[in-house]
Amino acid sequence: MRQQDQGELSFGAGPVEPPAEFQPREDALTREHLRILFLSSLGGVLEFYDFVIFVFLARTIGFLFFPADEPEWLRDVQAFGLFAAGYLARPLGGIIMAHYGDRDGRKRVFTFSVLLMAVPTLLIGLMPTYAVLGVAAPMLLLLMRVLQGAAIGGEAPGGWVFVAEHAPPGRQGTALGLLTAGLTGGILLGSVVATLTTILAGEPALRAWAWRVPFLLGGVFGLGAMVLRRWLRETPVFAALRNQHRLASDGAPAVRVLREHRRGMLTSMSCTWMLTAAIVVVILMTPTLLPRLSGVTPANAQRSILLASLFLTLSAMTVGVAVDRWGPRRVGSVLIPLFVLATYDLFGDLSGWPLPLRAVLAGTGAGLVSLVPVAMVRCFPPAVRFSGLSLSYNLAYAVCGGVTPPLVAWLATLGRFHPAHYVAVACAAGLSSLLFSRLPAAVPASSSPAP
């Protein structure tokens, strides 16, 4: 008897396979898969932190970057308008990066998006305010938000495509859920840093200098994330397409998407609207909305949404695992209606439960965001997957994400339930897309990409 190089046992006639229970499952997540997920998620955490820290400090930014004699509500709307400008820039950055991602490889674009986010974040932390530059200050801030929007336009679609094409077919929901949890973890990190900065510095110091600290930290750590992503390798799906000369070489991949995959775009855009409502309204805007709608203190609202962000991250992972077991339609049919009810309770206090508990339920329901990438990566074939996902996701986010903050801020002046009405309509569109779309069972295996 001798030990084979591959770990098999031989008794003369040939190799003897180890017992089935000791053989690795084809759909198991290996150490290499987990390493890729870790590095991808870490970059996503820092990039989404850089993008959303702005909204958690929106009131302070509005005070510092717009005339002090303006009404407070107008400064809030203008600050949210600057935040929304980042969404309006997403399609351009996303489409350009997706074009090169489908033509030259996923890895390069995935690394570049972090750099494009980190540099403007660092510059915002160093930027003079309205008191120093006058009207040039908000204009420069607008430019930085446009650059950040271009970066985030490539980050989320690129990350979802990257991990889906690395993961085993039976674990793609889990992989996408883990990465989405990393992206939402960036929102959680932004909420934690903003809360600690506000509490530890106090209002005078926050307006004087402390508001810069979260941006400076985000810029420095974002540059570190770019270095770490250099250790990633190209996806097996793209490598197979390149080796088989099946890349989208006949014109721009986005044009092919518009010509051949309009149904997939419609499904992806409807799901993105639902994701936008869950993240922008329930997580990002609630710290500003709740004090106005319910009379809670800003500090209590911030702490409650911190809890919501934590349970959003945990729920995003759980939903990804559930999708692998029961599929996106079944999971969505249960989770989406529960999320809508939790949103009404969050803004209207229907149950009489304490605010932290209502925020936990809303954050848990917001884990539905993991359903969105699962649906979208299945809507497009590998040769144009990055472009198809990026085009539909970013166009929808540019419209919905750009309109949502000022629209919901205005709706909140009409009644406390109006933001929840908006969330309900968006979720109805997302659930309808999941139920009536023609989604394949899974992303094709990496060894045999679909044409």
Image (cartoon, rainbow, N blue to C red):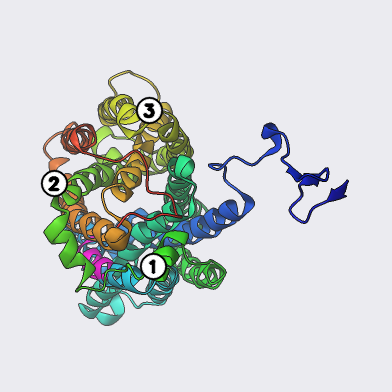
Residue 442: assigned label = none
Q: CA distance from mark 2 to mark 3?
A: 23 Å
Q: In the image, which is nearer the foreground, mark 1 or mark 2?
A: 1
* Residue found at x 49% / y 38%: 314
Relative to 426, is 245 on the left or the right? right
Which residue appears at 34% of the width and 35% of the height?
296
Q: Amino acid at mark 1?
A: Gln
Could you say where residue 434 lies in the image, as x and y percent from the top left? 24, 36
What is the residue that sits farthest to the front in this orientation? 13
Q: Which residues are magenta?
A: 87-95
Name which residue type carries label 3. Answer: Arg
Q: Nearer the viewer, mark 1 or mark 3?
A: 1
User: Which residue matches tag 1?
Assistant: 244
**Residue 380 visible in this rendered orientation of the protein:** yes
Local secondary structure at mark 1: loop
CA gap, disc 1 to disc 2?
Answer: 53 Å
Q: Residue furthest top?
A: 351
Q: CA distance from mark 1 to mark 3?
A: 53 Å
Q: Which mark is residue 410?
A: 2
Reading the image, the residue beneath label 3 is: 358
